[in-house]
Image: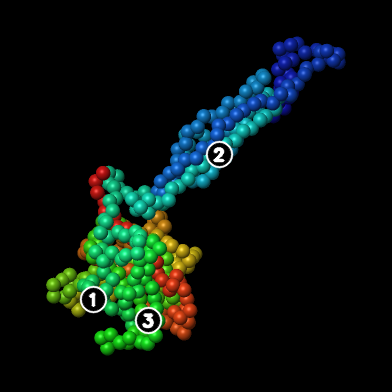
Amino acid sequence: MMNYKIFYALTLCALTSCSSSDDSADKVELDAIAPTINCQESITINIESFEDGAEVTYETPEGSDNVSAITSQIEGLATGAKFPIGTTINTFEARDAAGNKTTCSFEVTVVQNDPSANLPYFVNSNPTPEGKKWTKVENMSDEFNGTTFDDDKWHRSPSTDGFNWIGRPPGLFESDNVSVSDGNMNVTTEEFETPKTVNGIEFTHGGAIVRSKLKAKQGHYYECRMQANKTVMSSTFWIAFQQNCNTGPLRKLELDIQECVGRLTTTAAWAADFDHIYASNTWRHERECDTEFTGSQQSPAKTVLEEKNNSRYFVYGCWWKSPTEILFYLDGQLTHTITNPPADFDLEGHLTMAIETYDWNPIDSETIFKTASFDDLTTKYDWIRSWKLEDE
């Protein structure tokens, strides 16, 4: 490739009939003046949480020179391109025929907004069908601001929720363990000073259960922002379905959106990840009057996390898209799907938040219930939101 300076000298020779004389008066002076180029100010663009970039147009800089200059972009993206989230440095270079060059740069920064309370928590993509919009179901949504539990939206006593389930021993559901403070619904675990006997069953520890009064329906989207407690007890977000062999429905279904524990004592291989997991499931529980099958059946799906469920708040979401397709989102992004549930999930159920004990993750001699802080003993729900699709 020809050197720019030689090219420039030869060009001048062609125009001025260069002499081969060594006389200094006839020597060509090479161009030593660099071009000039100026870039615009840096740009910042804000986008919605479900967008993964933005098309950005800007004025492309043009270099100038005492003779002539060619301008080229040597870093970044051209005007009109889709810029990713973050900062992109755009650098332009002006170069003349003698090889002199000058550069300038500016930044394009694309900032992804935090998810809005007026839309489902979707990040980087938006699965909303064309021509539809999400509308919040207010009576199944709660930001848990203030200090008062909303008894008009939620049950917190097993005696009133229509299920009459008081907990799996040794964990008893106690409504006093549910409170609202610091922008959260708090469900606190405890060890009783002395065991309690209810219905002839002894309980040594307490949790709680909260259920929506309004029923959840297929086609809707349900999500919560939750931080798990640090005990062996659970932290959950799911949909419970009532069943009755006399009045129906005969099928006993269960849709688990998230089910985890704060600490593991189990040696069961299948539960080895349950303190750092997004575990979802669909159940058809065995009932004597449900004669179409024998034994409980399930279709699970999960995403194993790199962080403990109690390390921070996670957003768990479920689009109960149809009776046979259920999509699960973690922090706004699709992580797993169930498309083969053990029955059509076409019934209506109740949003449920249960903090309970499991026989597969038994309470051990750890003193956390006696020594831990309120924060460590508590599953915190920053918010719960429910959405339905409507025409735009």
Q: Position of residue 352 (x, y in %)?
A: 30, 68
Mark 3 and mark 1: span between their CA atoms? 19 Å
Foreground residue among 222 and 375: 375
Q: Quadrant of residue 232?
A: bottom left
Q: Of the residues shown, which amino acid type is indicated by label 2?
A: Glu
Mark 3, Cα crowd under 10 Å, few <14 / some 14-19 / many 20+, is: many
Dot 2 or dot 1: first in sequence order is 2
Q: Give me the disc on residue 159.
A: 1
Task: Determine the secondary structure under disc 2.
Answer: strand
Whether residue 359 is situated above or below residue 238 in the rendered picture: below
| Residue 268 in view (yes/no) | no
Foreground residue among 42 and 12: 42
Q: Of the residues shown, which amino acid type is indicated by label 1?
A: Ser
Residue identifier under label 3: 205
- Please tell me which residue is depicted at 26% across the width and 54% down the height of the picture: 388
Q: Of the residues shown, which amino acid type is indicated by label 3?
A: His
Residue identifier under label 2: 107
Q: Give me the disc on residue 368.
A: none
